Image (spheres, rainbow, N blue to C red):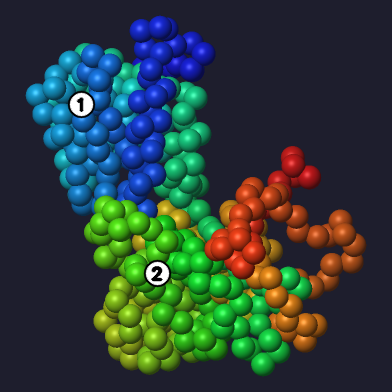
């Protein structure tokens, strides 16, 4: 395999970055293909686009196969630009490398190597053994990895990528003292939150939220801030609800809880002493025993189980102050989405988080601001701040 950077491209192949950007754009149109990665592919012959495709959902045609179908006979002696190394194993579908070879593809240009041990490097080996030229456009590797952060995290570290969503007033309150919180943010921010759910393999909450709010934690497609064409393109993926996860060490989840009665699967994590009998719950509910940690569950064990047992790439934590604080303190939050409403709730309102024991500013937990945006109509919307935990190097 040959590795190239944009600055090293010859005049003959100087348009390769253009085609790779096209492939990445196709992959981004997919909301989720979990547990698979989001992948895009374009096929070019004589510097003309002859086919394009993307992986719409698990079990559906991979991006390369979809692009080959569109290209037809024009794929022979053509170049395939694909955002991730083609697979060489049989999973829910057949190996992509076989389809590429059967179509007579002459050259494959990659943005990234697949981290999945079942694939990593093997697709390249098969292609090169058959005489196909394989190139790695190194400058696009980070873009391709960012597109599938959870997929890379799961296969490289055994953990999903964790997003924590929080909403607060200007004075850092999530609700009035009496618990009234509907709604702090406006419709556009709530629709944005629906899109976060749709991107996620699992929605995680705590028993406190289940008992206090009786949430559904489902994706409501009608509320997604997407065009009709985008909804249609993602119809299959959106027909599958994310896994809903309840952290309930004391087995207090009532069988009548709304979260259990909605479409899709639910897993309740508890300690070994209280997860032996699931007969009280609907058939879509799984009880999972994990080690305890103090009065609760070991959160890292929860994440490891979600990655290993449920193939979760990305999860969204929607919880109250106690569980949100626990995730942050454990260093398990990869990305914080903070929605700020332009209103004040007063000093008696409920706090966003519940950190204790901080004596100096040096003890504070710091974040880097990645993005700030107004969600909704300017002047009447909410602010969304995207943050990532500050590492020691960035302190």
Point 52% across, 86% down: residue = 213
Q: Is residue 282 left or right of residue 24?
A: left
Furthest residue toward top: 11
Q: Is residue 264 above or below residue 108?
A: below
Q: Is residue 275 above or below residue 125?
A: below
Image quarter in which the N terminus is found: top left
**Residue 104 visible in the shown view:** no
Among the two numbered marks 2 and 1 on one chain, the one whose residue lies closer to the N terminus: 1
Query: Tag 2: Cα neighbours inside 10 Å, few (<14), some, or many (≥20)?
Result: some
Point 30% across, 73% down: residue = 264
Classify mark 1: helix, strand or loop.
strand
Please provide percent x and percent y for residue 346. 78, 82
Question: In this figure, which residue is indicated by the disc labeled 1?
Answer: 50
Please provide percent x and percent y for residue 187. 51, 72
Q: Is residue 285 left or right of residue 103?
A: right
Point 15% across, 34% down: residue = 70
Front-lying residue, 372 or 387: 372
Please provide percent x and percent y for residue 107. 26, 18
**Residue 163 visible in the shown view:** yes
Furthest residue toward left: 73
Question: In this figure, which residue is indicated by the disc labeled 2?
Answer: 223
Residue 98 occupies which quadrant of the picture? top left
Q: Is residue 100 above or below residue 167?
A: above
Q: Is residue 24 above or below residue 346?
A: above
> What whole-number distance in Å separates the C-alpha atoms at marks 2 and 1?
36 Å
């Amino acid at each position: 395999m040959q590795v190239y950077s944009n600055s090293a491209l010859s005049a003959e192949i100087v348009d390769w970055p253009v085609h790779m950007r096209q492939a990445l754009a196709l992959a981004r149109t997919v909301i989720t293909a979990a547990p698979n990665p989001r992948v895009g592919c374009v096929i070019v012959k004589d510097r003309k686009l002859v086919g394009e495709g993307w992986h719409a959902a698990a079990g559906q045609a991979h991006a390369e196969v979809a692009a080959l179908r569109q290209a037809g006979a024009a794929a022979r002696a053509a170049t395939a630009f694909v955002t991730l190394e083609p697979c060489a194993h049989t999973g829910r579908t057949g190996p992509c490398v076989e389809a590429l070879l059967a179509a007579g593809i002459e050259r494959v240009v990659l943005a990234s190597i697949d981290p999945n041990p079942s694939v990593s490097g093997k697709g390249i080996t098969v292609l090169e053994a058959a005489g196909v030229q394989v190139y790695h456009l190194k400058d696009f590797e980070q873009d391709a990895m960012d597109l599938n952060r959870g997929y890379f995290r799961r296969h490289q570290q055994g953990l999903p990528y964790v997003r924590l969503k929080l909403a607060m007033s200007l004075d850092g309150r999530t609700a009035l003292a009496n618990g009234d919180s509907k709604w702090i943010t406006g419709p556009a921010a709530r629709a944005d939150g629906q899109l976060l759910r749709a991107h996620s393999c699992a929605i995680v909450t705590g028993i406190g939220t289940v008992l206090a709010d009786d949430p559904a934690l489902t994706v409501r497609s009608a509320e997604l801030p997407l065009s009709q064409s985008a909804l249609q393109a993602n119809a299959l993926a959106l027909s599958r609800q994310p896994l809903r996860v309840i952290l309930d060490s004391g087995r207090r989840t009532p069988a009548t809880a709304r979260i259990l009665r909605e479409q899709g699967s639910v897993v309740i994590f508890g300690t070994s002493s209280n997860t032996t009998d699931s007969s009280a719950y609907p058939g879509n509910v799984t009880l999972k025993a994990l080690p305890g940690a103090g009065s609760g569950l070991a959160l890292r064990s929860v994440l490891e189980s979600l990655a290993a047992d449920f193939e979760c790439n990305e999860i969204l934590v929607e919880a109250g102050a106690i569980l949100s604080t626990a995730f942050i303190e454990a260093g398990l939050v990869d990305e914080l989405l903070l929605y700020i409403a332009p209103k004040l709730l007063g000093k008696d309102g409920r706090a966003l988080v519940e950190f204790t024991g901080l004596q100096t500013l040096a003890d504070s937990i710091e974040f880097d601001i990645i993005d700030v945006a107004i969600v909704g109509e300017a002047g009447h919307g909410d602010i969304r701040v995207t943050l990532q935990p500050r590492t020691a190097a960035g302190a």
